[in-house]
Image (spheres, rainbow, N blue to C red):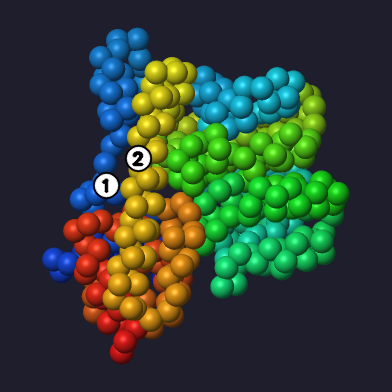
Amino acid sequence: PFAKIQPLPPDKIFHMKALYEACEDKNKADLSIGEYKDGEGKSMVLKVVREVEIDISERDDLTKDYLPIAGDRKFCHYAEKLVFGSKCKALNENRICSVQSIGGTGGVRLAAELIKKCAPKKIIYIPDPTWINHKSIFTRCSLEIREYGYFKNGFDFLHLIKDLKAAEEGSFILLHACAHNPTGTDPMPDEWKQIFDILKEKNITPVFDSAYLGFATGNYQKDALAIREAVSRGIPCLVAQSFSKNLGLYSDRVGCLSVVCDSEKEAENVFSQLKAIIRPMYSNPPTHGSLIAGTIFSNTFLIRKWKSEMKEMSKRIKDMRQLLYRELHRKKTKRSWDQVIQQIGMFSYLDLEKEHIEKLRNEYHIFMSPSGRASISGVNYGNINYIVKSIHQVLEN
Ligand code: LMR
């Protein structure tokens, strides 16, 4: 039946990672996918995760039975507390329902499926630019995608506000909760307030993609500021948390989709719809990641350990931003590199053209997204000189 189908181009982000892995050059550097690497360029498992995994392996009360369709209830409960805060009014009024998701992508996909199935208006506004998978997810769910201005040589707040004011009432908007992917540029607290004023007035529902909480300030709760502001204003919203980056549980695919509703009854109804979406799609989620995450989130001692490791990761990235900026300046490399230290989170959106990015990849074996998004976590003391020298040379020629 597939004899006549044509091949499609590979995924831009995963393809770069695969090219990096296949490359045999000794100087190769991976600034492509959003995966944290340590100071030696190695992937790592958080110490707190290792500790919990060892404990889990010794428990004799665990089974391989199916999880419920909505996933691990305990994990979802603590994930809600984490992002909304235990004093959150909506949480205490049981107006929030949550399901475990297959990573952050799975959470955004469930959100899109819910909009497709249940929302009167199936229009979603996405930032220009945004994570490349957003468009694919929303297209697959037949939502009407409209873009709003976000970044043009820096955060374009005026454009954003202009587009929001012209946006359709009752639609949805995709917001990056923090550490915007790919630009590393977020609204300031006061700007968030102005955004929510418009959303509330126009009855536009935010869908927060929350994949990098903990990577902006180093503190999970502080990074949830925009979400908490929206919820405290009584704005219904959808929040897709991912624990891939901040717990380093990439391959365990663990996330949580929460829907903040107007009433307990509405939350119950949404919950039943989400279960009906999940059941024919993948039946129920896997258990390992949620068991680890739920164990950590329910224990203040383990939370403290996790938070200190998260701080370490985000600090190392900040240090590498400073180093990259200093070295590019020291070499008097063409262009301004201010954005490297102004931007936050895992990525920097470098001021490079397509030809430079391709040259860096093909001739210098430095891999980054074709958009110029560089994962700063791939920078370390061992490869900084090579990266800077390569960028410098590419811009000189
Ligand atoms: C990224 O943006 O690099 C990560 O979120 C990985 C992915 O799934 O694209």
Image: 22 above or below 307? below
Residue 15 position, x and y percent, is: 35, 64
Residue name at image x 35 percent, y 40 percent:
312
Residue name at image x 41 percent, y 24 percent:
304
105 or 69, which is in the foreground? Answer: 105
237 or 349, which is in the foreground? Answer: 349
Residue type (three-letter) at the residue carrying disc 2: Glu
Q: Would residue 222 be found to the left or right of residue 226 on screen?
A: left
Which dot marks residue 48? none
Q: Quadrant of the N terminus?
A: bottom left
**Residue 84 shows in the view:** yes
Give the label, 1 or 2, closer to the camera.
2
Determine the residue located farthest toward the front in the rendered image.
330
Residue 213 position, x and y percent, is: 50, 42
Badge 2 marks a residue whose secondary structure is helix
Badge 1 marks a residue whose secondary structure is loop
Q: Neighbour class for label 2 at 10 Å: few (<14), some, many (≥20)?
A: some
Q: Earlier in the sequence, mark 1 or mark 2?
A: 1
Determine the residue located farthest toward the bottom in the rendered image.
397
Which of the 4 image quadrants contains residue 236? top right
Residue 89 position, x and y percent, is: 73, 24
Q: Quadrant of the C terminus?
A: bottom left
Residue name at image x 50 percent, y 24 percent:
75
Determine the residue located farthest toward the top in the rendered image.
61
Which dot marks residue 38? 1
**Residue 362 shows in the view:** no
Residue 69 position, x and y percent, is: 55, 28
Residue name at image x 56 percent, y 48 percent:
178
Residue at which label 2 appears:
312
Q: Would residue 363 be found to the left or right of residue 106 on screen?
A: left
Residue type (three-letter) at the residue carrying disc 1: Asp
